[in-house]
Amino acid sequence: MVSIKINNKQALIKCMKSFEQSKGVSIYEHGVSVSSYYKELKSHIITGDELKGNWKLPAWVKNKSLWSLTLPDDMVEQYHIFHDCGKPMCITYDDEGNVHFPEHAATSKIIWNSISNEVEIGELIGMDMDIHQLKAVDLDAFSQRREAATLLLTGLAEIHSNAAMFGGIESVSFKSKYKHILRRGNALVKIMNI
């Protein structure tokens, strides 16, 4: 555990820039990347812009009704950029020197809420891992959340943003994460009747 005093957004950004999310990528750069992937995906679906990166798109992502349920773009951008802001405060290392960030979503929510009164963004930050860990039994409850569409589409952007770290979109790790998002998205659009 690292003890760091953060009292404003600029200090938080500086802290995020000083810790790596993955080799050569700071926590801040990762957040900006997720935001960029999400924006690219949204502009592809909504306005037909070409995708620049390597993407694997499930059928449900093309559902404009799903996109119409997402939260406002300015709120979503702040969520994406700062979704891992608590990682520097909960970083641990195992016996082999591997990095772990236990309870980083909850820690990130606490850190965000300590420097901002934008509580809805803090809620999104705290829910960031929910789509990646969502069990079939919890789909109905998840689908009732106002944030459900945003979290699902963000999850898809996140795994694409992280694909290089996994070994690309053909890697076993990416395929596993994509399969989970694909299944949860298939179920959610049915439950949400969109």
Image (cartoon, helix red, strand yellow):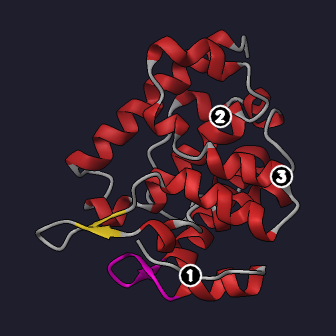
Q: Is residue 111 above or below residue 44?
A: below
Q: Residues within 10 Å of mark 2 (few under 14, many from 20)?
A: some
Point out residue 135 in the picture as x, y percentages from the top left corner: 44, 21
Q: Which amino acid, mark 2? A: Lys
x then y, percent, for residue 77: 75, 62
Q: Marks 2 and 3, Cα distance to the nearest angstrom? A: 30 Å
Q: Is residue 19 magenta?
A: yes
The quadrant in which the N terminus is found is bottom left
The residue at the point 56 percent across, 17 percent down is 139
Q: Would residue 48 be visible to someone looking at this image?
A: no
Closer to viewer: mark 2 or mark 1 = 1
Question: Residue type at mark 1?
Answer: Ile
Residue 112 placement: quadrant: bottom right
Q: Is residue 135 above or below residue 160?
A: above
Residue 119 circle label: 3
* Magenta run includes residue 176: no
First of labels 1, 3 by sequence position: 1
Identify the residue position indicated by label 1 in the image: 4
Callout 1: SS: loop
The first of marks 2 and 3 along the sequence is 2
Q: Which residue is located at x 66 percent, y 52 percent? A: 125
Label 1 crowd (10 A; few <14 / some 14-19 / many >=20): few
Quarter holding residue 4: bottom right
Residue 132, labelled with which disc? none
Kindly state the secondary structure of the residue where label 3 is placed.
helix
Does residue 175 sit above or below 27 in this rendering? Answer: above
Three-letter amino acid code of the residue under disc 3:
Val
Residue at 61% in and 35% down: 61
* Rendered view: 18 above or below 85: below
Left or right of 56: which side holds 81?
Answer: right
What segment carries the magenta color?
18-26
Total numbered circles: 3
